[in-house]
């Protein structure tokens, strides 16, 4: 069935993994703006050249560029009957742009899946991962900072969709299948059932 979804979740909550699973089960593309930017950087496209310095500095790519990128991606045939956005919208301006774009096509966002997890558990998980992978620059301080930045930046976006009753909170702690099942159950409770 068609489903126009957004997924948000703190670093370490397995958002990318769950995004892939939801997209596969609904038969819709998972669209990650971060992945698209990274691909453009790797290929040295004009967009990639513009985005690289900002990304390296940990800053956002301007809304004008990001919105255009999403517009053209959503015009591709595979997104006609639905999509799952990951990493977009990230600013209130992007929320407004997406609203206008979808309204133009007579569609709208159906739900925003928010993975929720205890910060201390996530920090512990990310610290262990950093240790296992020898990433010594991922200290507890930087990991906690990233969690804080995430919380601050996501709050207005979630609030905007929350006002419309579109936010579905899902407990993000547990095995991949367990969390995946929770997401499916929560979405089907809203009349959004996977086809596969
Ligand atoms: P991510 O993998 O989603 O963390 O994205 C990596 C980087 O791409 C971010 O740090 C930003 O520089 C850029 N980026 C991704 N999505 C967006 C967005 N929606 N708005 C602005 N910049 C973005």
Image: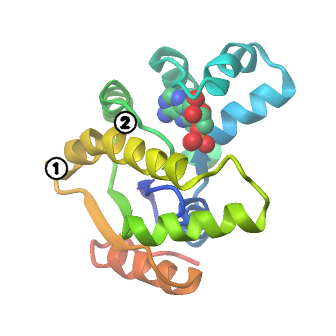
Crowding around mark 1 (Cα neighbors within 10 Å: few <14, some 14 to 19, many 20+) is few
Is residue 76 in sight in this rendering? no
The picture quadrant for ligand 1 comes to top right
Q: Is residue 176 above or below residue 86?
A: below
Q: In which quarter of the image is residue 3?
A: bottom left
Residue name at image x 37 percent, y 36 percent: 102
List x then y, in percent, for residue 24.
62, 68
Q: Can you tell which mark lies on residue 102?
A: 2
Q: Nearer the viewer, residue 161 or 125?
A: 125
Instruction: Check the picture and name the quadrant holding the C terminus.
Output: bottom right
Residue 33: x and y in percent read 59, 38
| Percent x, y of residue 151 | 34, 48
Residue extending farthest to the left is 163
The answer to which of marks 2 and 1 sits earlier in the sequence is: 2
Kindly identify the residue that appears in the image at 48 percent across and 80 percent down.
Answer: 179
Circle 1 is placed at which residue position? 164
> Element type at marker 2?
helix
Rendered location of residue 5, percent (x, y): 42, 55
**Mark 2 neighbour density, 10 Å: few (under 14) some (14–19) many (20 or more):** some
The answer to the question of whether label 2 and label 1 lie on touching residues, with beta carbons closer than 8 A, is no
């Amino acid at each position: 069935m068609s489903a126009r979804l957004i997924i948000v979740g703190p670093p370490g909550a397995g958002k990318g993994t769950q995004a892939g699973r939801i997209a596969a089960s609904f038969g819709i593309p998972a669209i990650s703006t971060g992945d698209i930017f990274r691909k453009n950087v790797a290929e040295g496209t004009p967009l990639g050249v513009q985005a690289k310095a900002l990304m390296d500095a940990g800053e956002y790519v301007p809304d004008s560029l990001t919105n255009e990128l999403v517009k053209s991606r959503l015009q591709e045939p595979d997104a006609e009957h639905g999509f799952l956005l990951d990493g977009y919208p990230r600013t209130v301006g992007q929320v407004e742009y997406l609203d206008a774009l979808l309204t133009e096509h007579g569609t709208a966002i159906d739900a925003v899946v928010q993975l929720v997890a205890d910060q201390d558990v996530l920090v512990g998980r990310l610290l262990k991962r950093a240790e296992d992978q020898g990433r010594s620059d991922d200290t507890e301080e930087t990991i906690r900072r990233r969690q804080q930045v995430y919380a601050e930046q996501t709050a207005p976006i979630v609030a905007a969709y929350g006002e419309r009753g579109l936010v579905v909170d899902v407990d993000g702690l547990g095995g991949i299948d367990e969390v995946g099942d929770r997401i499916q159950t929560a979405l089907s409770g809203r009349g959004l059932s996977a086809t596969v």
